[in-house]
Amino acid sequence: MSNPFCFSPDDARAGFPRDPAAMRFAYVLKHGTMKLGLYAQTDVDRQQPHAQDELYVIASGKADFLREDQRVACAQGDVLFVEAGVVHRFETMSPDFAAWVVFWGPEGGEAP
């Protein structure tokens, strides 16, 4: 990593598991309750609902995004929000698909 406050997809990919069958995800920053990682799975999205709220920022490529019973096409530059505990996944990801993932806040979502 060339800069402690500027992260590229290549910085994150350097932390991906070497096993090609493993999930393509790596964190590049953790600060307080906030965590930043890159998700670049291109076959089957097996993720489960998360304990924290999250934002996805599509870094490259395109995909269909399912959030409970809603489906939306997304592409580079789009931002998606998912509350803690909500079922979601990406489908039909392009070969160059990658999304920044930002988790933050208390487990279970925003405190009342």
Image: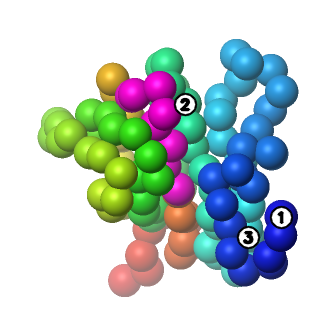
Q: Secondary structure at mark 1?
A: loop
Q: What are the residue bounds of the magenta stretch?
A: 93-100
Q: Tell me the tag on residue 103.
A: none
Residue at image position (48%, 20%) is: 44
Inspect the image, locate mark 3, and give the three-letter code of the amino acid beneath it: Lys
Inspect the image, locate mark 2, and give the three-letter code of the amino acid beneath it: Gln
Q: CA distance from mark 3 to mark 1?
A: 14 Å
Q: Which residue is mark 2?
A: 41
Residue at image position (66%, 60%) is: 8
Residue 12 percent across, percent down from the top left: 71, 52
Along the polypeptide, which appears first: circle 3 or circle 1? 1
Inspect the image, locate mark 1, and give the three-letter code of the amino acid beneath it: Met
Q: Are marks 3 and 1 in contact (CB under 8 Å)?
A: no
Neighbourhood count class around disc 2 (C-alpha, 10 Å): few under 14, some 14–19, many 20 upward? many
Residue 110 percent across, percent down from the top left: 42, 76
Residue at image position (56%, 37%) is: 40
Quarter of the figure with residue 63 = top left
Q: Are marks 3 and 2 in contact (CB under 8 Å)?
A: no
